[in-house]
Amino acid sequence: MDNVLVDFRSAFPFIKDDIKKKYKNNMDNIKGIFSLMTPMQDAIKSFEILAKHFDVYILSTSPWDNPTAASEKVEWVKKYLPELAYKRLILSHNKHLNIGDYLIDDRLANGVDRFKGEHIQFGQPNFKDWSSVVNYLLLKEKITTKKKNELDKQKI
């Protein structure tokens, strides 16, 4: 979620300076921070598009030392993706244990580097924004569907 669907920095203007200073190396441990965040640009629209073509889940890590983070992430999903992501939020510190074709994440942490499918590293030159991610995945799906249809015709 963080820095992929959710704009982590969008919460900063709402946090007092003394709290920011106290948690400067662990901002995700600030109680209530996740409830202050807004979506990344085009994230909601892109999720809606991808949900029409793929079986989409949200895979995120909840900071271990922030007791409110998990519930705030659930509330964020309910607020911004209530129907499409209903009961499709997975919180895990071991993302590699999940099975899927693609994982869109901005980092290699929490098992992303061991994920068996393709890691799309959000924010990097090839996938700098949601438009580039959606275009890539839809083109890949079109090619995969075309190949599958050709194979199916050969079987008949």
Image (cartoon, rainbow, N blue to C red):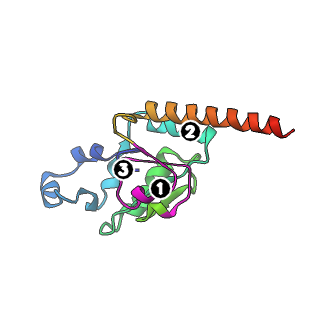
Q: Which residues are magenta?
A: 97-121
Identify the residue position indicated by label 3 in the image. Answer: 2
Kind of element beneath mark 3: loop
Residue 59, numbered label:
1
Q: Dividing the picture into quarters, in which one does residue 18 lie?
A: bottom left
> Which residue is at 22% across, 60% downward?
26
Identity of the amino acid at label 2?
A: Leu
Upstream in sequence: badge 2 or badge 1: 2
Give yes or no for residue 146 being in the magenta stretch.
no
Identify the residue position indicated by label 2 in the image. Answer: 50
> Which residue is at 48% across, 38% downward?
44
Rendering coords of residue 90 (x, y %)? 50, 60
Q: Is residue 45 left or right of residue 10?
A: right
Answer above or below: position of 61 versus 36.
below
Separation of marks 2 and 1 at Cα, in angstroms: 15 Å
Give yes or no for residue 117 being in the magenta stretch.
yes
Separation of marks 1 and 3 at Cα, in angstroms: 10 Å
